Image: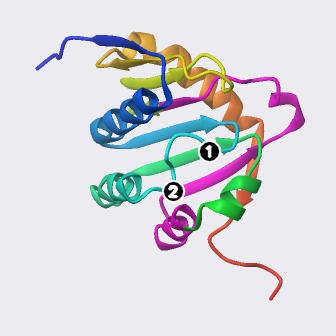
Amino acid sequence: MDETALSRRFASLSEYQQALDIVIEQARHTLYLFDYDLHEGGWNGPQRYALLKRFVLGSPNNRLHIALHSVDHVRRNCPRLLNFQRQYSYAVLIHETHPEARSINDPMLIADGRHYVHRFHYEQARGELVLHDPEQTLRLAQRFDEIWHASSVAVTATTLGL
């Protein structure tokens, strides 16, 4: 059954967080997230944890890839997300971008190559939620792929050097 594409704009951080939840709930295989540092979006909250856990446990093949310009906020202020990564290390990767990708400034969350949330700039809440539109999602998925290739592992599930 083909679902009708839906597109909706948002202009506040609360609408952005709601849009993120909607896309996570739609995900069945992959979630690709790019953000500056995850300080907005509710990524350490209990509701988000529950949604991500449901996604990861949906299949042993489900994957969450996170690319950030800076991982400092995650390391200092997101214990729930760090514990989530430790618990599901087989499914969750957190990368930090290399200098050549630091000029990219539009956060995005992509689910299964069909749904996305896209903020136009990380300093503004404005953006769009798109569901059931693989054609529109393809351009962002390609962009995420470029960001992912211009990043490397930055937060690991284990502590090295002990």
Q: Residue at x 49, y 49 (%)?
A: 64
Which quarter of the rendered picture does the N terminus lie within? Answer: top left
In the depicted structure, whether residue 125 falls above or below residue 58: above
Q: Left or right: 60 with respect to 154?
A: left
**Percent position (x, y) of residue 93?**
59, 55
Name the colouring of the figure: rainbow
Q: Residue at x 89, y 35 (%)?
A: 99
**Percent position (x, y) of residue 37?**
69, 44
Q: Which residue is mark 2?
A: 44
Residue 105 belongs to magenta span: yes
- Whole-number angstrom distance, CA of label 1 to CA of label 2: 9 Å
Q: Earlier in the sequence, mark 1 or mark 2?
A: 1
What amino acid type is highlighted by mark number 1?
Leu
Q: Check disc 2 and report its element: helix, strand or loop.
A: loop
Q: Residue furthest right?
A: 99
Quick one: label 2, few (<14), some, or many (20+) residues within 10 Å? some
Q: Residue at x 43, y 32 (%)?
A: 14
Closer to the camera, 35 or 45?
45
Q: Residue furthest left?
A: 1
**Marks 1 & 2, CB-CB < 8 Å contact:** yes
Query: What span is colored magenta in the figure?
Result: 80-109
Q: Left or right: 23 with respect to 31?
A: left
Closer to the camera, 14 or 5?
14
Which quarter of the rendered picture does the C terminus lie within? Answer: bottom right
Quick one: label 1, few (<14), some, or many (20+) residues within 10 Å? many
Quadrant of res 160 = bottom right
Q: Which residue is mark 1?
A: 38
